[in-house]
Image (cartoon, rainbow, N blue to C red):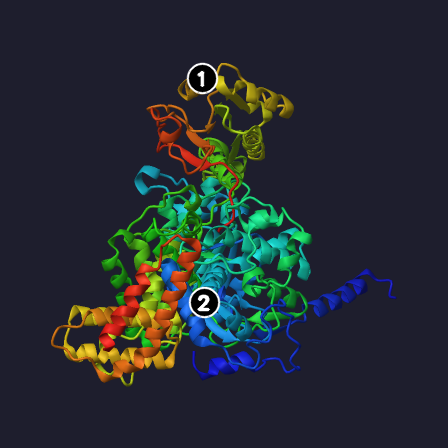
Amino acid sequence: MPAYPDAQLDVAGELLALLRDTTTEPRPDTQLEALTLAVAADLPVLLWGEPGIGKTAALTQLAEALDLPLTTVIASVHEPSDFSGLPIVGDDPAEHGVPMAPPDWAVRLVRAGRGLLFLDELSTAPPAVQAALLRLVLERRIGALRLPPEVRIVAAANPRSSAADGWELSPPLANRFVHLQWTHDHEVVVRGLGGTWPRATLPRLAPERLPEAVDFARRAVCGLLSARPGLVHRMPGSETRRGGPWPSPRSWEMTLHLIAFATAAGSSREVLSALVRGTVGDGPGLELLASLDRMDLPDPEMLLADPAGAVLPERGDLRQAVLDGVVAAVRNRPEKSRWDAAWKLLVHALETGAPDLVVVPATTLASLRQEDWDVPASIERLAGAVKLSRRADHAAARAAAVADAGAGAGAGAGAGAGAAKAAR
Amino acid sequence: MTADTRQAGTTLRTAGAPQPAKTPPPLGLGLGLGLGLDRDKLFAARLQAARARPYLATALFALHTVESRRVPTMAVDRHWRCYVSPAFVDRTPVEELAGVWVHEVSHLLRDHHGRGDRVARERGLTGAGERLRINIAADCEINDDVFGDGLVRPDGAVDPESLGLPEGELMEDYLRQFRLGPRTQSVAWLDCGSGADGLEREWDLGPDGAHGLSAQERDAVRFRVAQGITGRPGTAPKGWQRWAREAFHPPQPWRELLGAAVRSATTGSGAGEDYTYGRPSRRSAGVPGAVLPSLRRRPPRVSVVIDTSGSVSDTELGSALLEVAAISRAVGGRRDLITVLPCDASAEVVHPLCRAEGIPLVGGGGTDLRTGFATALRTRPRPDVVVVLTDGQTPWPDTPPPCRTVVGLFPRPHVGRSWREHDPEYVPDAPPEWARVVAIGSAAAVR
């Protein structure tokens, strides 16, 4: 063993090199994908995550993918003047004003003209530092400098439960951010420490899909908000949701941008869900996603136009929603041809899926029959559904007899009878 | 539900040889062996279930049925597949099958697999026995109010009563209250699958199998069901209404909320640690011409006003008081900067508590909350934050006090009863808008 201390350091260096020798494997990463899209859309992002779960590692990966130089600034070790600039008192302040001198890293960033600025530990800094930082994030100004548009900013904070000093965003500030919850995946961490880190394939915007993406996003948001005016603006009410995302015209516009970006990148619903819920909050976000699901369903009018070639969704609840939509469309414009087409569709549904879904739409459709309409021949093939319905009725009657509660059986009796009457 | 489903049930995804099925309970065995699944009977039962519980129809129809001979009865997995044993369908009447449908879908809606995993991790529960206990506890949570009113209790369904437990609690609570023993022998064959306790089963098709719902789709189904329940209250029983309220807004533990409220009140401007231009920084000498702020600390002063009648339990009051004291110290308040003012009725409860904890007690809180406030604000130096611990049966000050106010509100006893049942004359006011209100009580997990 050599007696020189520097040789010891060489050995240590070798050991460190061995430890750093890791491989990567492709693995889908929803939260990183969501972050990439939000950064690409140039919206202020706030990552909420416990300390030490690899937020910085994720940002490094993101900077590589977007080909931007990464500048990390740990907020809690800075002073407010580092972000708001140093007031330099000159010869004649009344004449020239007091210029605010920016720190050197900001000057470098502006000179480079592009970059990814990561503001870590936002929540552990003193209030004055946080105020200066938020100004940087939201107004993109450091002292007298203005950051060029090619600089993207991501901030990170610890959630309230683990923040040492109970920091929280006021609702007006919270409304300006896309909030992304950053969690660690147990399996990923264990595999990573074993030497294999995940390599996320980041979303790419497809140039040919841009107009379609904008159109889709506008239809989605406008469709929901015209049906639900109450969702346009709703201040957070309870103590639980303070400092989180909430719906306002501003955050809906951000949502629209994010939907367009996610559509243009062909991202999964999981990613979109994280983005939308992190911008307008859980409730309105889920409503929006539900209305997107409805937009994906086939249009009732198209189905009625071509019942033979109809492709119904596999999933039972979606299939029932489609059939209900078809019956509602016939109710809105009752014509013999449309009524017949709807029966064809129901038969098609019965032959390709579970029979119990068809019973309620069939009953409703039967009740729409008008005096001079003849019953279509295809209705014979719905006999299975009628039998099923009767069977359920009998079971319900037995259940009522057992419990002598007598509730719940009445609704079913009408259904079987209605369909049977139509079938005669 | 097409041909590929029927294959999915019988072909094995694992390359190994099929293992022998678990022994189902020794009744009706052999009736359905060799026969395929009686789909009509199964779906008639689902239709009856959807009619009896219209608010669950979306969830019932979202389940994807898979025929499986290895399942003892019916079981679900976390991807909303429902594995059905043909023999079980044959030997069970339609009305009981309807009850089983609702029971299985309840496991999924209430996220028993996720909660089961969490509980197992938190309490270190390992092994099949513990998972069976989780399954039984989850069944107890569902079965206490799911049957009746058009649904028949299936044969052998476990409920809290049969284990000698109270009704209306959550899986997490039930888990602490029973062990596997003679009382649970009769349900030892029961298995609702990985959807009920989080443990993968040999028949599960896994995340890559066909027709599974993704996490986002599962959320969407849950959300639609919850919306249906909150949109038409009155049809669903109380347990489901509570589930619908909390499905997407789980209650946070009150300690965290109270802590956050007190912390943010004590660290607001004027108290705690912050930069100020009021005094020049000591660095200024090195940077001529620049004006630098200096970092100053001012420990926050917290006044706790306690106004409770005898209805609040000492343990809850004590824990809330300790919480406030601990937080005030954590943000740099010294012990002598916390004062406690009990109002008349609560004095005898508070005195021993404060003595035991060494918290300084200031007398003269007055007879109700308004005088308590006034006394707290008269103390010099004036408090930065007033924390009020109250059960709400009190008049509030008309004007906001000149400092931040946090209200810890104890739940009224007999939740769910209106005030008028107790006392037809008196309805107390809700806490005012200018205070941050945290409800104190044991925040339960989501049902």
- The image shows residue A212, relative to residue B274, as above or below, that is below
Write the residue at 59% across / 64% down. Answer: B191
Distance from Cα at disc 1 to Cα at disc 2: 69 Å
| Residue B84 image label | none
Q: Is residue A203 visible?
A: no
Q: Nearer the viewer, mark 1 or mark 2?
A: 2
Within 10 Å of the Cα at label 2, are there few (<14), some (14-19), or many (20+) other Cα atoms? many
Q: Is residue B137 left or right of A82 when viewed as pictured?
A: right
On the same chain, marks 1 and 2? The answer is yes
Identity, as a three-letter code, of the amino acid under mark 2 = Val
| Residue B94 image label | 2
Q: Earlier in the sequence, mark 1 or mark 2?
A: 2
In depth, the one of A121 and B87 nearer the eye is B87
Q: Position of residue A314 (x, y in %)?
A: 39, 76
- The image shows residue A149, relative to residue A381, as above or below, that is above
| Residue B375 image label | 1
Q: Is residue B171 visible?
A: yes
Q: Are marks 1 and 2 in contact (CB under 8 Å)?
A: no
What is the secondary structure assignment of the residue under circle 1?
Answer: helix
Q: Position of residue A413 (x, y in %)?
A: 31, 64
Write the residue at 63% across / 26% down. Answer: B357
Identity, as a three-letter code, of the amino acid under mark 1 = Thr
Q: Is residue B165 left or right of A285 when viewed as pictured?
A: right
In depth, the one of B404 and B406 nearer the eye is B406
- The image shows residue B281, relative to residue A217, as above or below, that is above
Q: Position of residue A34 (x, y in %)?
A: 44, 64
